Image (cartoon, helix red, strand yellow):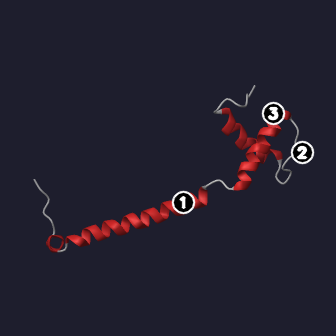
């Protein structure tokens, strides 16, 4: 059983393609905005390196802007998955 096409869509097929195009443009813009807002920034890369330094050497003299826990906690998750940091 086929679903009947509304008469307005039979006369104006560009209405469907235009609507789909608009939805795709809006979705692409939302995806780009989300990637921009949630992507790592340059300071996060430095914090990850400082956290690795803290965990491997036990010294806390780099990147003293934030407390050590802020630097070490994400580093444990990121580096334990690739085997660089032992949690023993």
What kind of element bears circle 1? helix
Q: Earlier in the sequence, mark 3 or mark 1?
A: 1
Q: Residues within 10 Å of mark 2 (few under 14, many from 20)?
A: few
| Quadrant in which the C terminus is drawn | top right
Residue at x-position 69% and y-position 36%: 79
Assess disc 1: are there few (<14), some (14-19) or many (≥20) residues with their C-alpha within 10 Å of its C-alpha: few
What is the crowding at mark 3: few (fewer than 14 residues within 10 Å), some, or many (at least 20)?
few
| Quarter residue 60 falls in | top right
Depicted 31 relative to depicted 73: above or below: below
- Rendered image: mark on residue 34: 1
Q: Front-most of 77 and 57?
A: 57
Which residue corresponds to mark 3?
56
What separation in Å lies between label 1 and label 2 (alpha carbons)? Answer: 34 Å
Residue 7 screen position, x and y as percent: 13, 72
Height in image: 20 above or below 47? below
Q: Residue furthest left?
A: 1
């Amino acid at each position: 059983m086929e679903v009947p096409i509304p008469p307005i869509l039979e006369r104006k097929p560009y209405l469907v393609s235009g609507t789909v195009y608009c939805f795709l443009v809006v979705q692409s813009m939302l995806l780009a905005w989300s990637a921009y807002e949630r992507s790592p920034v340059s300071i996060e890369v430095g914090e990850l390196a400082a956290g690795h330094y803290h965990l491997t050497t036990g010294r806390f003299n780099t990147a003293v802007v934030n407390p050590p826990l802020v630097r070490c906690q994400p580093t444990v998750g990121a580096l334990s998955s690739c085997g660089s940091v032992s949690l023993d």
